[in-house]
Amino acid sequence: MARHEARALVVRELVAEHGVLSRRLAQLQQRVGDQLQASARRQAALDGENIRLRGELVRMRTAVAWDLRSAALVPRAATGPRGLAPRIAPGLLEAQAVICQTGCAGHAHPWLEPDGQCRRTGQACDRLEDETLSTATRGAGPSDPE
């Protein structure tokens, strides 16, 4: 009889352990299900934002391509954190000067707005002012004998 009671005790312990493991499995399944739902909501939000941003990009590119200045966004001044102006490498400044010389101060002025704004940067064209000053200075100086 002791053997039968020992066996019954082992069976009860196994049943209890099975119950504990089954409850733990149910908790884990619930947790994974909740995480999957949260992930799906996050993915749907990101997909919506992606579509919205793509639409905005198409709108901006179309405005630029059709030269709709009022519809295009005016770019913000390039500033770093806390409103500090970014440091620009000397090589980049030279490249900027070449680009401005070609696009704003060149013979066709494709980037120069009638009011003196640069379409590329959205700022006043300082290159054009420099050229005007240097032309005035050259004309006002003494003439070179030939």
Image: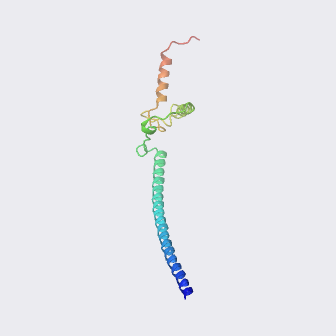
Query: Where, quadrant-wise, is the C terminus in this rendering?
Result: top right
Q: Position of residue 127 (x, y in %)?
A: 49, 29
Is residue 106 in view from this perspective? no
Q: Give the quadrant of residue 101.
A: top right
Question: Is residue 70 or residue 23 the one in the foreground?
Answer: 23
Q: Residue furthest top?
A: 145
Query: Where, quadrant-wise, is the N terminus in this rendering?
Result: bottom right
Q: Position of residue 83 (x, y in %)?
A: 42, 37
Q: Position of residue 87 (x, y in %)?
A: 50, 33
Question: Is residue 140 or residue 74 the one in the foreground?
Answer: 74
How many numbered marks, from 0 up? Answer: 0
Q: Residue furthest left?
A: 70
The residue under the point 50% across, 75% down is 22
Q: Is residue 12 above or below residue 91?
A: below
Q: Is residue 123 above or below residue 21?
A: above
The residue under the point 49% across, 48% down is 61
Question: Is residue 10 or residue 109 the one in the foreground?
Answer: 10
Is residue 21 in view from this perspective? yes
The residue under the point 47% across, 49% down is 62
Q: Is residue 12 above or below residue 125?
A: below
Q: Residue furthest front?
A: 2
